[in-house]
Image (cartoon, rainbow, N blue to C red):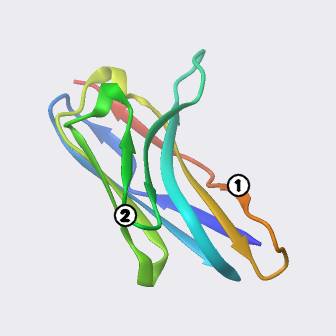
Amino acid sequence: QVQLVESGGGLVQPGGSLRLSCAASGSIITVNRMGWYRQAPGKQRELVARIFSGGNTNYADPVQGRFTISKDDAKNTVFLQMNSLKPEDTAVYYCHAVASYSGSNRFASWWGQGTQVTVSS
């Protein structure tokens, strides 16, 4: 079993910044990748950014150049630094991980509870 807990969401003005964090806990054996997804009301959930165990990253086009994903392997934590925020970034942001744990010999997909990010003046 793996648990993901997000923090750092809130209300920010356009052009401002927020830093999200997500800590994974449980009997983790191997983390393949961790990332962030977001979902606004009436819209599909979409990938924001992800980082693989080796350090490679992917970004969605709308956030390329504005957001940066990073991780701390010792703490099983992933971060999302969000700069130059726009109103269209408003959404619930979900932490995601692909990882194996002691009770399974296969990778599984794990989700956090989500944290609200609102960009508004």
The residue at 23%/33% (across/down) is 85
Q: Nearer the viewer, residue 51 or 119?
A: 51
Observer able to see residue 86: yes
Identify which amino acid the numbered label 2 is placed on.
Gly
The residue at 19%/37% (across/down) is 65
Location of residue 60 (image quadrant) = top left
Bin the neighbour count of mark 2 within 10 Å (Cα to Cα): few under 14, some 14-19, many 20 and up: few
Residue 62 horizontal/vertical position (percent): 32, 25
SS at mark 2 in the image: loop
- Is label 1 or label 2 in front? 2
Mark earlier in primary sequence (1, 2):
2
Residue 100 horizontal/vertical position (percent): 71, 71
Residue on which disc 2 sits: 55
Eyeballing the image, is 64 above or below 17?
above
Residues at marks 1 and 2, CA–CA distance in whole angstroms: 19 Å
Location of residue 101 (image quadrant) = bottom right
Bin the neighbour count of mark 1 within 10 Å (Cα to Cα): few under 14, some 14-19, many 20 and up: few
Residue 28 horizontal/vertical position (percent): 66, 79
Q: Quadrant of the C terminus?
A: top left
Q: Nearer the viewer, residue 116 or 85?
A: 85
The residue at 82%/74% (across/down) is 105
Q: Is residue 7 left or right of residue 95?
A: left
Marker disc for residue 88: none
SS at mark 1 in the image: strand
Q: Quadrant of the N terminus?
A: bottom right
Residue on which disc 1 sits: 109
Eyeballing the image, is 54 above or below 47?
below
Observer able to see residue 26: no
Residue 74 horizontal/vertical position (percent): 43, 84
Q: Is residue 19 left or right of residue 26?
A: left
